[in-house]
Image: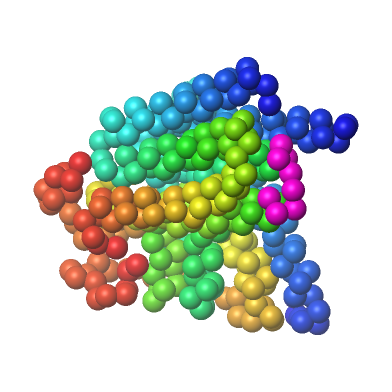
């Protein structure tokens, strides 16, 4: 059963790749200064991380039905994680999570009502 | 998958989860926590996949499918909570 | 794209967009991962929030373009204004306004060509209109 061994090994590689992506995203949560950059870092594990863990699990336990389920799961994960991170980023902007100082241009600031004095933003922390 | 690889994988995943957990504890705002909670959820999908492979669960891919479909509900509801209902 | 018989090249355009997107997706993942692991002094990050003029028309196109932008790590759709045809994009590696605008518009061009039977009008407003903040935005203006 050579093919079986190859698929098993490839599955392990994919699973560890996904785990590594999740750990890097975890490190990114500390190394990056503001919400939007952190959301970008988590975006890597939302897409590539989960997808490669699912693909790895598929390679280790392969069947036609599992292939269909895994494909649907990966597509669902990609779509829903995009919607989720957009919702979080938007809510962060409404909740006065201002971008870090290294952000050199902020076009959205022009369109925004000034809420800097609004204490409501702090109360929900 | 041998016992030792499984253990290494679980420990690494737990490490990632711990990092996200600390950020969720520290996070100055609720949206930072929401991002961290998102990452914890992805680590949980990893746990499900690993343990499911180990225990030979028949319905492993159904569980993963449902988990990916439901996972973003938490993100959406935390986003709504963070913005106080504003969109 | 005007010389090709549009209906025959439609599936080809879809496949080529998907392949191009997968390439861009993987590359963006690698960039973000490397930058997170780089020592602080050598980090290449220069984040910015840029108003990108967009050519999308229908609901489907607006939704898909913002999903695709968010899905690529490093770029994030914060808000859209359909009235002014603007996408507000947060980018992680933005050297200048033009570079991000070009990147997003290339993705949008490819996506619209893949989605539409014939590419149609891909023009965008030349100048970024100044969006004046209003006290209470009417429902549905800023989403």
Magenta-colored stretch includes residue C143 = no
Residue B38's spot in the image, x, y percent? 41, 43
Furthest residue in direction top, as rendered: B4
Q: Indicate left or right for A115 with C25 as reference.
A: left
Q: Quadrant of the N terminus of chain B?
A: top right
Question: Could you say which quadrant of the image residue C86 lies in?
Answer: bottom left
Q: Residue at x 39, y 69 (%)?
A: C81
Q: Residue at x 59, y 44 (%)?
A: B60
Residue B75's spot in the image, x, y percent? 38, 50
Camera-side residue of C137 and C127: C137
Magenta-colored stretch includes residue A65 = yes
Q: Quadrant of the C terminus of chain B?
A: bottom left
Residue C75's spot in the image, x, y percent? 50, 50
Q: Residue at x 56, y 32 (%)?
A: B51
Here the colouring is: rainbow
Q: Indicate left or right for C126 with A118 as reference.
A: right
Q: Which residues are magenta?
A: A59-66
Q: Is residue C103 visible?
A: no
């Amino acid at each position: 059963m050579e093919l079986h061994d190859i698929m098993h090994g490839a599955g392990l590689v994919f699973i560890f790749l996904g785990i590594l992506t999740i750990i890097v995203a975890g490190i990114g949560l500390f190394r990056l200064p503001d919400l939007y950059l952190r959301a970008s870092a988590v975006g890597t594990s939302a897409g590539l991380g989960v997808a490669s863990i699912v693909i790895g699990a598929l390679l280790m336990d392969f069947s036609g039905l599992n292939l269909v389920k895994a494909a649907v799961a990966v597509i669902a994960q990609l779509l829903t994680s995009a919607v989720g991170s957009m919702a979080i980023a938007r809510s962060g902007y409404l909740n006065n999570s201002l971008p870090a100082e290294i952000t050199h241009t902020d076009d959205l600031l022009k369109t925004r009502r000034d809420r800097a004095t609004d204490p409501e933003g702090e109360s929900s922390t | 998958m041998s016992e030792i690889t499984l253990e290494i994988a679980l420990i690494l995943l737990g490490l990632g989860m711990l990092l996200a957990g600390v950020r969720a504890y520290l996070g100055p705002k609720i949206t930072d926590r929401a991002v961290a909670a998102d990452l914890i959820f992805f680590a949980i999908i990893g746990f499900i996949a690993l343990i499911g492979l180990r225990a030979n669960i028949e319905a492993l891919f159904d569980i993963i499918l449902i988990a990916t479909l439901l996972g973003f509900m938490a993100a959406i509801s935390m986003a709504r909570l963070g913005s106080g209902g504003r969109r | 794209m005007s010389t090709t018989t549009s209906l025959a090249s439609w599936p080809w355009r879809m496949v080529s967009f998907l392949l191009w997107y997968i390439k861009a997706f993987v590359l963006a993942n690698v960039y973000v991962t490397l930058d997170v692991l780089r020592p602080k002094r050598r980090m290449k990050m220069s984040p910015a929030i840029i108003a990108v003029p967009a050519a999308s028309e229908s609901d489907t196109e607006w939704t898909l373009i913002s999903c695709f932008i968010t899905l690529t790590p490093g770029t994030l759709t914060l808000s859209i204004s359909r009235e002014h045809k603007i996408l507000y994009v947060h980018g992680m590696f933005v050297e200048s306004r033009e570079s991000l605008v070009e990147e997003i518009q290339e993705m949008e061009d490819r996506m619209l060509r893949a989605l539409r039977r014939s590419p149609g009008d891909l023009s965008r407003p030349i100048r970024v209109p100044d969006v004046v903040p209003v006290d209470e935005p009417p429902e549905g203006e800023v989403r």
